[in-house]
Image (cartoon, rainbow, N blue to C red):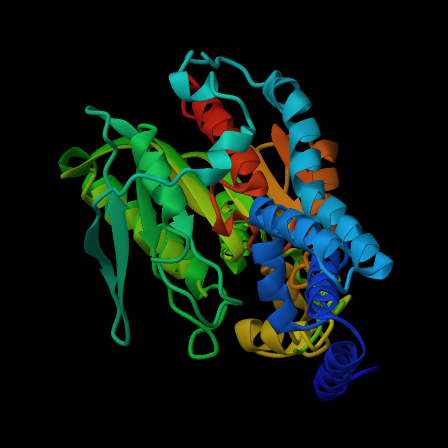
Amino acid sequence: MLNRHTVVLFLSFLVLLLIYETSFHLVILTLFFLAALLNVFKSPTSELWLLAVVTSEYSIIFAGLISLLLLTNFYAVSFTLVGTILGLTALVLFLLPIRDAYFIAQKLPSDLEKAFRQMKNVTIKNDQKLINKPFNIFKLFQTIPKVSFRTLTYVTYDDATLTLDFYGSVVTGKRPCVIVIHGGSWIGGNSKQLSELNRHLAQAGYHCAAINYRLAPQWKCPAPIEDTAAALTYLRQHADELNIDQNNFVLLGRSAGGQIALLAAYTVQQSGIKGVINFYGPADMIWGYMTPTNPLVPIEDTAAALTYLRQHADELNIDQNNFVLLGRSAGGQIALLAAYTVQQSGIKGVINFYGPADMIWGYMTPTNPLVLDSRQTLARYIGGDYFEMPDKYAASSPIEFVNRQTVPTLTFHGLTDSLVFYEHSRRLDAKLHQNDVPHYYLELPWATHGFDYNLNGPGGQLSTYAIDYFLNVVTNQQ
């Protein structure tokens, strides 16, 4: 396998050769063409993954630059047919996310309605936010309004003090609460990560509590699940103060936070969790270990955050019966695990952004180590490799806790994700389908890990529309 230095040297040589042999325009068009390939292929290194987030979700800007370069190339003295072909190909590749988003948007409303039609005793409010189109090309150039937040301490351990950022709903009265669990491979990240969605949710009429949780390797799983449960408890205890509807919580996690959100939603024994939203989180930890990434936590903390939000529900105007967990990447795994395991009332759903749902499958299918050494990441989080502690890998896999009583689940994943393979979400989707759990899985052909960095990008618009619909459904259950 090529190492990072070999790849860098090869690309450097290619760039120097192009500069020596051809015109400046051709060099630039070639570089744009190589960048555009990231919209259809997985990133081979961690640096190129970061570039892929930009090329896919800000693709309209790159398409404009390519068009300008093609015009100047055509009239340049050093005009080349090769440059024109490369430029036109790059233009098509940069427009793919916009084209795909348009076609997905045409059927997204009906697909969501079909997915959650089976839910009983649900009254869908005709909210203005759901009248908007799932994708609007003019929205690509808009920004999200600023919303103030408060930082609150929701739990104190002997060796750690955990806080959450509380974004109060702009709508008065008892309101549902979305608990957001950040990603960062269980070893990094914080509650400030990708805060645009938090501001959007507050503007849409939901309280949003973005939590910090204990990180690996100092703290191992299930610490983040316990922290999520503590956050739920806190929010319930302060429900009157925060104006929280205690029967309406939804967990949302990204990546590692997706795993936490899923596990908490599927295991935490608390009422009021109405759903889980999983952004590209690892749902199968065993599979994830066996399928490593390219090398270029805690459930307890989530529970603690829930506890804190309950304790301050009156102060923060939280409806204690309406919590939603949302997690991205590692946060997606945490959100899933918290939603599926934390025994607290009021958890109505879980939202999983590209989280690892099956830790066993993840172990068996490692990622490219030039991007992420997934087996080492899993071992730091769980405490060892799979063959040393298979039971702990199973216990950290949200997919293992899915049953017919599992809360509604919304999952997002991109097919070019090189950090958490999309198979995690497909496997979770199949398990939820087998158990007749209300759920929806939105798969984006062009998207990579962290595609929701730009909330008004193609992936950001589609996922935000789906979240608005999901929250409208699960928080209006009778």
> Which residue corresponds to the image point at 71% horizontal and 59% vertical from the top-left?
76
Q: In the displayed image of the protein, which residue is found farthest to the front?
A: 77
> Is residue 341 visible from the viewing direction of this image?
no
> Which residue corresponds to the image point at 56% horizontal and 29% vertical from the top-left?
135
> Is residue 124 visible from the viewing direction of this image?
yes
Front-most of 109 and 471? 109
Give the vertical position of 40 relative to 23 (above or below): above
Give the vertical position of 259 relative to 115 (above or below): below
Q: Position of residue 164 (x, y in %)?
A: 28, 55
Q: How many marks?
A: 0
Q: Position of residue 75 (x, y in %)?
A: 71, 53
> Which residue corresponds to the image point at 79% horizontal and 73% vertical from the top-left?
22
Give the vertical position of 450 relative to 318 (above or below): below
Q: Quadrant of the N terminus?
A: bottom right
Front-most of 235 and 175? 175
> Which residue corresponds to the image point at 70% horizontal and 64% vertical from the top-left?
25
Front-most of 272 and 208? 208
Give the vertical position of 121 relative to 465 (above or below): above
Residue 199 as seen in the image, left or right of residue 455? left
Q: Position of residue 342 (x, y in %)?
A: 45, 48
Q: Quadrant of the C terminus?
A: top left
